[in-house]
Image (cartoon, rainbow, N blue to C red):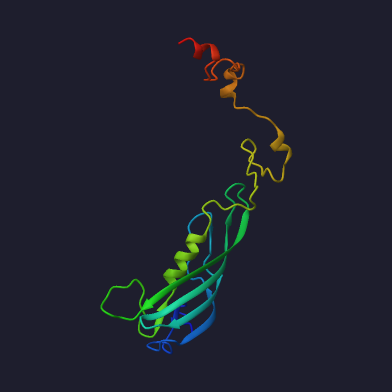
C-alpha cells in the first residue's frame, strides 16, 4: 500500500519481525520533483514504474527493486528534444532499530524508498545524452542540424588562423626522429 502524500513510503507491517516472509508489489508513482539536473531528467509529474520485492530477514527488511522511467530533455549535440528509457535496479537492507547507526531503517511500519530511487535514477542518466550514437551535431557556422543538412558535413572549411602553416610540410627525412644507419655507425 502506498501513501498518496508520501508515495515512496511502502508499508511493511505484515513483514516486520517475520523472517522468511516475502511480498512482491508493482507500483506506479507520479514523480513529485524532477530527478536530474542536466540536459535530461525524469520530470515532475511523469511516472515511475516499480517492481518491488520485500523480504523479511532477521536484521530487517531486504528491498529489491526495478525502476522504469522515461527521461526527457535535449540532445547534447544537436539540441533536439529526446526521450530516453531509464531502467535501474537496487537492493538495500532496511534494518530494525538496534542502537547501531544504519543508513536505512524500518520506520514504524514502513520503508522510505525515495532516496534510493532518486540516487539510482540520477546516476543512470547520461551526462551527455544524444538522440542517436552517430549524431553529427550542429554546423558551427550556420547552427543548422547536420543530420538534416548532410551537404554541410562535406564542405571543407579550414580555420583561417592556420592558413600560414598550410604551406609547410615536413619532408620524410626531416623531423622523423629516426637515426640513419650512417649516423649510428659514426661512433
Viewer-proximal residue among 172 and 178 = 178
Residue 53 on image: x %, y %: 50, 79
Q: Quadrant of residue 60?
A: bottom left
Q: Residue at x 63, y 42 (%)?
A: 138
Is residue 34 at all visible to an observer of this figure? no
**Residue 134 visible:** yes
Which residue is at a point 60% across and 60% down the rendered structure image? 84
Q: Position of residue 82 (x, y in %)?
A: 62, 57
Question: Residue at 62% of width from left, 55% of height from top?
Answer: 81
Residue 116 location, x and y as percent? Answer: 44, 69
Please tell me in which quadrant of the rendered image residue 74 appears.
Answer: bottom right
Vertical side of 18 occupied by 31: above or below: above
Q: Residue 95: where, in percent of width, then height?
A: 35, 78
Instruction: Indicate the quadrant where residue 108 lies.
Output: bottom left
Pick the quarter of the image with the C terminus.
top left
How many numbered marks are there? 0
Vertical relation: 33 (above or below) 78: below
Name the residue at the top extreme: 186
Q: Residue furthest right?
A: 151
Residue in the picture at 44% in, 65% down: 119
Position of 159 with respect to 14 (left or right) is right
Amino acid at each position: 500500500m502506498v501513501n498518496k502524500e508520501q508515495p515512496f513510503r511502502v508499508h511493511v507491517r505484515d513483514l516486520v519481525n517475520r523472517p522468511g516472509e516475502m511480498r512482491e508489489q508493482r507500483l506506479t508513482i507520479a514523480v513529485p520533483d524532477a530527478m536530474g539536473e542536466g540536459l535530461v531528467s525524469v520530470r515532475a509529474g511523469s511516472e515511475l514504474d516499480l517492481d518491488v520485492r520485500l523480504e523479511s530477514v532477521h536484521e530487517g527488511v531486504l528491498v529489491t527493486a526495478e525502476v522504469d522511467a522515461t527521461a526527457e530533455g535535449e540532445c547534447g549535440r544537436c539540441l533536439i528534444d529526446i526521450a530516453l528509457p531509464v531502467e535501474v535496479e537496487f537492493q538495500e537492507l532496511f534494518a530494525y532499530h538496534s542502537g547501531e547507526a544504519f543508513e536505512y531503517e524500518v520506520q514504524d511500519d514502513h520503508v522510505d524508498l525515495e532516496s534510493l530511487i532518486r540516487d539510482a535514477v540520477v546516476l543512470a542518466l547520461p551526462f551527455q545524452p544524444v538522440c542517436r550514437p552517430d549524431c553529427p551535431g550542429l554546423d558551427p557556422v550556420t547552427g543548422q542540424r547536420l543530420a538534416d543538412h548532410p551537404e554541410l558535413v562535406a564542405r571543407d572549411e579550414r580555420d583561417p588562423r592556420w592558413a600560414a602553416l598550410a604551406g609547410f610540410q615536413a619532408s620524410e627525412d626531416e623531423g622523423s626522429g629516426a637515426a640513419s644507419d650512417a649516423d649510428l655507425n659514426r661512433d
